[in-house]
Amino acid sequence: MLKTVKTRGLALLATVALLGGTAWIAAGTTGAYFSDTHTGAINGSIGSIQVVANGSTGKALSDLSFANMLPGEPQTVTINYKNTGKNVQDVWITFPNATALSSLNNVGTWGEAHLAANGHSLFDSANLNDHANSCGPFVPAGCWPLLSKYKVATSLAPGASGNVSFTYELASKVVTPPTVFNLYPAHDSGGLGIGMNQGGNSHDQYFSETGVSGEGLPFAIVATQQGQTP
């Protein structure tokens, strides 16, 4: 009886040892499964959004000037631009000096402004007034101020070019023209004697920054990625 128990015990141990060895062999064969590997790398080039205006490759443009302006005789200045970047882009003209812009938008019917891009009109106004409290809603047929930015080209391809023009006319009713175009902040040099300088502007322009003064209308040509704004 004792011998039989011992025999069975040895057989059980042998079985367990055998199963354990089989499990070890199975566990050790995981690296033998079939596999196939292909290697590579992710590369890329970076695009660019870049524009030149009037041939200038720097950040500053040469100033554009009206010469010897007379009432009733419009004058036009033109800016040419070209996409020198690697990607399609949108192009804008902006008027970043808010004091100068508000000064222009204070001449009322004493001045007339037009903005066009590639032969298409973007803005036309014979009543440059940004006083919403006195004008009410801004409408093209009424008070219509120049905005701070306009898109002049959409999806301009690399190497493609275009132009934007700004036209200004002193109203024919002006008797005493201002000495310079768009003095800012607004000054009253007599004119009609009621706060408005004929063809110039009045003291009460809508917006004026302390310490900001000059003459003319600063602008910038800005290129952006498609669908983005300056």
Image (cartoon, helix red, strand yellow):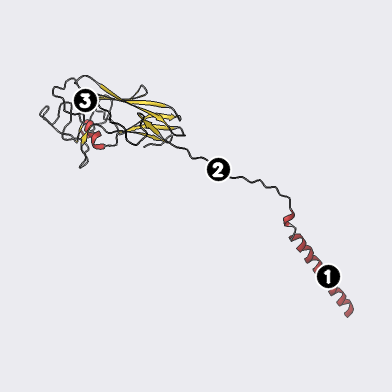
Q: Position of residue 125 (x, y in %)?
A: 26, 25
Q: Which mark lies nearer to you, 2 or 1?
A: 2
Give the alpha-carbon distance from disc 1 to disc 3, as whole Å.
Answer: 110 Å
| Secondary element at image label 2 | loop
Residue on which disc 2 sits: 43
Q: Which mark lies nearer to you, 3 or 2?
A: 2
Give the alpha-carbon distance from disc 2 to disc 1, as whole Å.
Answer: 59 Å
Q: Earlier in the sequence, mark 1 or mark 3?
A: 1
Q: Position of residue 211 (x, y in %)?
A: 20, 42
Residue at image point 87% right, 75% down? 7
Q: Position of residue 196 (x, y in %)?
A: 14, 29
Residue at image point 16% right, 28% down? 179
Q: Tell which of 50 and 94 is nearer to you.
A: 50
Residue on which disc 1 sits: 14
Give the alpha-carbon distance from disc 3 to disc 2, as whole Å.
Answer: 56 Å
Residue on which disc 3 sits: 111
Q: Position of residue 1 (x, y in %)?
A: 89, 79
